[in-house]
Image (spheres, rainbow, N blue to C red):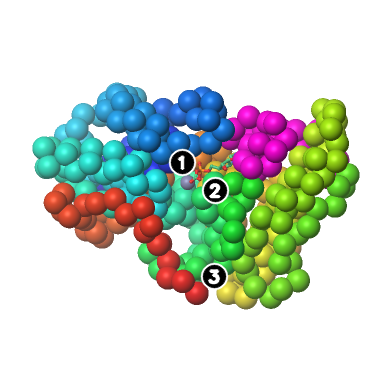
Amino acid sequence: MRVLGIETSCDDTSVGIVRYKSGRFAIESQVTASQVLIHRRYGGVVPEVAAREHALTILPTITAALARARRRWSAIDAIAVTAGPGLNTALLVGVETARTLGYLLKKPLVAVNHIEGHVVSSWASPAANAIHFPAVALIVSGGHTELIHITGFGRYRLIGRTLDDAVGEAFDKTAKILGLPYPGGPEIARRASRGNPQAFIFPRALMKAGSLDFSYSGLKTAVLYEAQKHHARSPRLVNDLCASFQQAALEPLIEKTRRAAVQKKARTIILGGGVAANANLRSGLEQMVAALPRVTYVQPALSLCMDNGVMIAMAGAIRAQRKDYTAWPRLQADPNWELVGQK
Ligand code: KG4
Ligand code: ZN
């Protein structure tokens, strides 16, 4: 089965083609038209601008993905598309494109939840055959900070979430405070690698509480106060602020994932989302899991951390194999689609 996946939920127009056979994925192509440079001017994503860019780039992106995979439409068995959650105007472009192509080309359509895409983004890695259930997934992006208890593909329960900002959002807002460009995550990580994480002691929210929830607004405010104390900020000071912020942002993620895995007797820990590209988060989770007996760990390839069409094609392929299709007249965007029930 070969699936073409379309992702337009935020600021990347991305298309991936994936072959799924005997439980294994082969990525045949991935093409992304990034809007980062456009949104950088505004310091964040502007939904109407994102939708316009998606509309202008979606068809060339699909054509490029087919060309790169050296496939014609006749080789595509199904079209998967992110139906939510995300920005409504942005989602609409992908969904309406998929509906039109599904109708005209007579291809079955799969509505994919964006978070499920992030959950399966690590499943193409060679370590993917080490995935066993129950599993605990940590999904960290610009819009989400979630711990999900997974008892099988499609069986999810939300066991922890952020009470305010998402961790990626905290990276982005902190970068803005420090005058660094959008998106803040990669820039903060780069500076943090040259800074001292012990230079400032920032709060680690909800670490004592038994809950698996997160909170990032206090940390952001603490960085703001500290930054305001220093009018002239040397590069060294900025590096130290970044390193101290990053450490405070990542520690609760690693510790609460550990607690969740122990509580749920997880056999696998799964990482996903844009913040999964963070090198310290990856190594921190690796070290944490190494101390847990009989628990395996999978993380997405760096190219599959940020929003992409491949992960949507992957989740779509698993659903397509189960004939979990949505007829084109019924397919619609749902900006608030919850993957999992509330706790
Ligand atoms: O999954 P994603 O591409 O989009 C959403 O669904 O939100 O995640 C984007 C987020 C941004 O907040 C960005 O700053 C963050 O991921 N990010 C990082 C890193 N690379 C991207 N955060 C920390 N460290 C990174 N290396
Ligand atoms: Zn995402």
Q: Which residue is mark 2?
A: 141
Q: Amino acid at mark 2?
A: Ser
Q: Does residue 127 appear anywhere in the picture?
A: no
Above or below for 120 versus 266: above
Amino acid bearing label 1: Asp
| Residue 312 appears left or right of 42 | left
SS assignment at label 1: loop
Q: Tell me the CA gap for discs 1 and 3.
A: 23 Å
Q: Which residue is mark 1?
A: 307
Q: Is mark 2 within 8 Å of ligand 1?
A: yes
Quadrant in the picture for residue 103: top left
Q: Earlier in the sequence, mark 1 or mark 2?
A: 2
Would residue 34 be seen by someone viewing this image from the given angle?
yes
User: Residue at (39%, 53%) from the top-left corner?
Assistant: 85
Please provide the residue range marked out in magenta.
171-197
Distance from Cα at disc 2 to Cα at disc 3? 17 Å
First in sequence, mark 2 or 3: give its number: 2
Residue 266 at what x, y percent from top left?
A: 57, 69
The residue wearing badge 3 is 159
Q: Which mark is residue 27?
A: none
- Quadrant of the rendered image containing residue 257: bottom right
For residue 194: magenta?
yes
